[in-house]
Image (tube, helix red, strand yellow):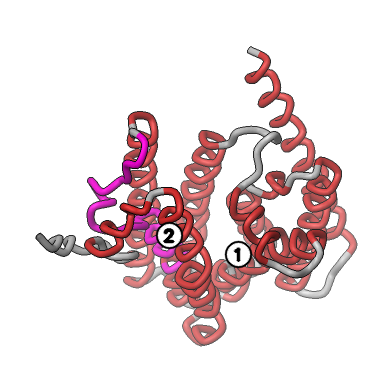
Amino acid sequence: MDEYNSEDQALVKVVAAYVVALFGAGVTLALVDYNPLLDILIADVVATLVIFLFSIAYRNCSFYDAYWSVVPPLIALYWLSLDLSQASALRELLLLGLILYWATRLTLNWAYHWEGLHHEDWRYIGLRERSSLPDFVVNFFGVHLFPTLQVLLAMLPVYAVYCLGERGFNWLDIVAALVTAGAITLQMLADFQLHGFIRNRKEGEHLDSGLWAWSRHPNYFGELGFWAGLFLFGLAAFPAGWYWQVAGIAGMLLMFLFVSIPMMEQRSLVRRPSYQSVIDSVSMLVPWPPRRKAP
């Protein structure tokens, strides 16, 4: 019972941190008036700074965990509220609905796995251990600011839809909706399979069934598919801006290929050396029939 009470109290602290952060972002938006993109960048950094201060106060960067999924729908709602594009109300509402679907799923998944403030994500700890920079610098720039800027970069197509959209609803919007919804659903299915495996796994076992038999990281593939879907929405609304909108999905792809996946697989190999057999037989990211294992 004490453990549950402790987690509940920690969750209250996290919620309070986000209330303060969003209040700070709201005040910032009320004070600045440059353009919709620069205004939201400043407000986003202010909110990130507030969460960072809570992380310092409690000596735990887990305060930032939910930021990735909580903030994007709020950014989308802000841009939508400006009513700058009259190209397609259907596209705007469909996009918002899909972002809310993604954000709800991801936030609930975070809440399901969250272990309270006595625990900190191993990736944050690993970043600090591998860096020669002071922990304060790594925590702010590596753990907090970099992901904030990465997500905002990936939200550029959403900015294009709500603030620059010039084309009416078209066939590419349908493709975008199918890609985005399919990616979120694939992510959700991958998480369900992962949760079931974690509940019943034995020491040394690794997940290599279901979607995980075709991809070592189907959840990451779904996440990339979501951001690719947003890019397609932006392309449908404002094709002239394709060259800067693509920066978001490109950045996400590079982050997963060269940071997230290598960190995850290195940790898996250290904890379970037999995971090498999965690496040898299962596609890293794109779902693909597994290779036959050598006899």
Q: Amino acid at mark 2?
A: Glu
Residue ID at (82%, 57%): 49
Quadrant in which the N terminus is drawn? top right
Residue 295 rendering spot, x and y as whole percentages: 9, 60
Residue 219 rendering spot, x and y as whole percentages: 39, 53
Looking at the picture, tell me which residue is in the foreground, 226 or 250: 250
- Examine the rendering and report whether any part of residue 160 can be seen: yes
Residue situated furthest right in the rendering: 31
Residue ID at (15%, 60%): 293
Q: Hey, which quadrant is residue 273 in on the image?
A: bottom left
Residue ID at (70%, 23%): 6
6 horizontally vs 58: left or right: left
Above/below status of 25 relative to 194? below
Above/below status of 182 relative to 1? below
Residue situated furthest top in the rendering: 1
Q: Amino acid at mark 1?
A: Val
- Examine the rendering and report whether any part of residue 26 can be seen: no
Residue ID at (68%, 15%): 2
Residue where numbered disc 1 is placed: 151
Q: Secondary structure at mark 2?
A: helix
Q: For residue 265, which numbered disc appears in the image? A: 2
Residue 169 rendering spot, x and y as whole percentages: 41, 68
> Which sits earlier in the primary sequence, circle 2 or circle 1?
1
